[in-house]
Image (tube, rainbow, N blue to C red):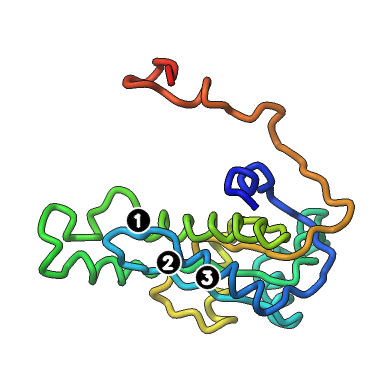
Amino acid sequence: MEFMEVLRARRMVRRYDGTPVADDVLTRVLAAGLRAPSAGNSQGRDLLVLRSASDRELFWRSTSGPGPADSWLTGMRTAPVVVLLLADPGAYARRYAAPDKLGPDRDASSWEVSWPDVDTGMSGLLLLLAAVEEGLGACLFGVPGAAHDVVRAAFGVPADRRLVAAVTVGRPAADEASRPSRAHRRTVADTVHDGRFGAPWGG
């Protein structure tokens, strides 16, 4: 598939047919996620893959509140794969304390932007695109903050890793349809500013 075709085809899939994802296909999707750039080439991200029914059930049980599941959760639970995107801030702190990283950014704790989270999010985007390339669907979503410690304990995630997001991966259900939350997708004309904020793009 051509790159622009992948971009046009990408959408958040919220219900799957439950078919397992072949190991070689999943490996290619995961490898794509590791191609994301990272500040200072710190590479401070980990991908925790949940494939067994018991692991997936433990994840959903750990992250959803009491009471019956809503339609979103019911659909998402049909995904055969859940990937947890974990940032490793310590890797960035160590990298930027290295002798070759002189300058005002050496103290990672002073950064106004959390680059570990940004870079880990970019890995998530590449997972979404790679899934499309493989004929699959995917959805990136947040995990409630109150559930982070529960998830760490359930899956042995070290305390120094930060759970940025999760991605479900699988084959979309036959009747799964895109449900845009907004009628209008912002375009170059109403999003891109040329030289000064508010100046329309002239390209």
89 w.r.t. 10: above or below: below
**Residue placed furthest toward the right:** 175
Residue 54 image offset from top left, x and y in percent: 74, 83
**Residue at x-position 58% and y-position 28%:** 186
Q: Which residue is mark 3?
A: 31
Q: Which residue is mark 2?
A: 87
- Which of pointers 3 and 2 indicates the residue nearer the eye? 3
Residue 176 image offset from top left, x and y in percent: 84, 51
Give the mark nearer the N terminus: 3 vs 2.
3
Residue type of the residue flagged with mark 2:
Ala
Nearest the eye: 178 or 110? 178
Residue type of the residue flagged with mark 3:
Ala
Q: CA distance from mark 2 to mark 1?
A: 9 Å
Quadrant assignment for the C terminus? top left
Give the mark nearer the N terminus: 2 vs 1.
2
SS category of the residue bearing label 2: strand
Nearest the eye: 69 or 33? 33
The answer to whether mark 3 and mark 2 are in CB contact below 8 A is: no
SS category of the residue bearing label 1: helix
**Residue at x-position 44% and y-position 16%:** 200
Residue 43 image offset from top left, x and y in percent: 36, 68
Q: Is residue 202 left or right of residue 109?
A: right
- Give the quadrant of residue 136: bottom right
